[in-house]
Each structure stands twice: as structure tokens, then as C-alpha cells.
């Protein structure tokens, strides 16, 4: 593969990772909020039972308020992970995980209910970035 084509493929991988990861992560969070074990002591009043069926409910709304900036953090996270894979530096993923975990620790400590949303969103976002980065890395090699 020529050098300019590799750069074009890398740019496409970064764009796909950053932009398509947001709706995917949001969809997984909605599914998780609707699951039977999504929180709440009363089975009829869990996180996924709000009347408009938005999938978040009271627990998800509080978590979203606590974890401000999640969309932008997720975009930057996916860019960093995909970029680390494209440049052949997978150890860079550890830095992303460390920075994100340490940066969110005070908020998660104050609101333990947000930790489930944080873990689900982070894992979904990171898995997507690894899949995209790995696929495009294989394409370039």
C-alpha cells in the first residue's frame, strides 16, 4: 500500500473510530439501562423504566449529570486508542485508561451509581476503538 493511501486509511480509521463510537456507546448504555438488573430496589422503578422509554431513568439522569463531558472525553479516548494502534504503540492504551480512570475517580467516588454507566461506556468505547484501529492496521500491513 502506498504511503498516501496508508495516511488516508489512517485518517478514515480515526474518523470512524471517533464519530461512529458515540452513537454505538449511547445505544449500549440505553440497552444496559433497560436490562432487568439496571438498578433500583423496586423492580417497577429501576433505571430503565421511565415513562418516555428514553432508557436512562432517574439513575441514568443522575449519572449523566455527574459524568459531564462524556461525549467529548469518549471522542478523545477513541482517537487516542485508535491512534496508538495505528502507530504501532498499543501500550499507549494503558495511558488512556490511567488518565481516564484517575480523572473520573473523584466524581465516581462522590456518586457510586455513576460507576456502572462509566464502566459500560468506557468498555464499549474502547472496544470499538480497538476494533477499528486493529482492522485498519491489518489493512495497512
Image (tube, rainbow, N blue to C red):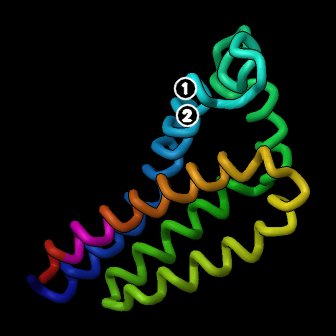
Query: What is the number of callouts on the image?
Result: 2
Residue most extreme to the left: 1
Q: Which residue is depicted at the point 77% across and 67% down?
A: 104
What residue is drawn where x is 46% and y is 43%? 24
Q: Which residue is pictured at 72% across the width and 10% down the height?
A: 44
Rendered view: 116 above or below 140:
above
Position in image of residue 59 (x %, y %): 78, 33
Based on the displayed image, in which of its 4 quarters is residue 53 positioned?
Answer: top right
Residue nearer the viewer, 86 or 127: 127
In the picture provided, is 38 more to the left or to the right than 61?
A: left
- Residue at the disc numbered 2: 32
Residue 60, image quadrant? top right
Q: What element carries label 1?
A: loop
Dot 2: within a 10 Å radius of its alpha carbon, few (fewer than 14), some, or many (20 or more) residues? many
Magenta portion: prevailing SS class = helix
| Outermost right residue | 110
Give coordinates of residue 34: x percent, y percent. 58, 24
Q: Residue 56 carries which label?
A: none
For the C terminus, the image quarter is bottom left
Residue 131 in view of the camera = yes
Marks 1 and 2, Cα distance to the nearest angstrom? 5 Å
- Residue tagged 1: 35
Does the CB distance between marks 1 and 2 fall below 8 Å? yes
Relative placement, left or right, of 29 versus 103 is left
Location of residue 36 in the rendering, given as x and y in whole percent from the top left corner: 57, 22
Q: Which of 5 and 80 is in front in this view?
A: 80
Secondary element at tag 2: helix
Rendered position, 25 above or below 88: above
Q: Residues within 10 Å of mark 1 (few under 14, many from 20)?
A: some
Q: Where is residue 12 in the image (x, y as percent from the top left)?
A: 32, 65
Question: Which segment did they paint magenta?
Answer: 132-137
Q: Say which quadrant the N terminus sits in.
A: bottom left
Amino acid at each position: 500500500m502506498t504511503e498516501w493511501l496508508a495516511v488516508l486509511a489512517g485518517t478514515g480509521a480515526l474518523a470512524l473510530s471517533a464519530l461512529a463510537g458515540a452513537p454505538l456507546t449511547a445505544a449500549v448504555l440505553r440497552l444496559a439501562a433497560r436490562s432487568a438488573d439496571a438498578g433500583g430496589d423496586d423492580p417497577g422503578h429501576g433505571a430503565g423504566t421511565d415513562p418516555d422509554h428514553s432508557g436512562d431513568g432517574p439513575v441514568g439522569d443522575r449519572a449523566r449529570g455527574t459524568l459531564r463531558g462524556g461525549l467529548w472525553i469518549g471522542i478523545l479516548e477513541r482517537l487516542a486508542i485508535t491512534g496508538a494502534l495505528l502507530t504501532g504503540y498499543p501500550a499507549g492504551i494503558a495511558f488512556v485508561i490511567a488518565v481516564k480512570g484517575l480523572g473520573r475517580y473523584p466524581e465516581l467516588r462522590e456518586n457510586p451509581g455513576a460507576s456502572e454507566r462509566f464502566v459500560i461506556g468506557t468498555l464499549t468505547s474502547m472496544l470499538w476503538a480497538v476494533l477499528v484501529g486493529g482492522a485498519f492496521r491489518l489493512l495497512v500491513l
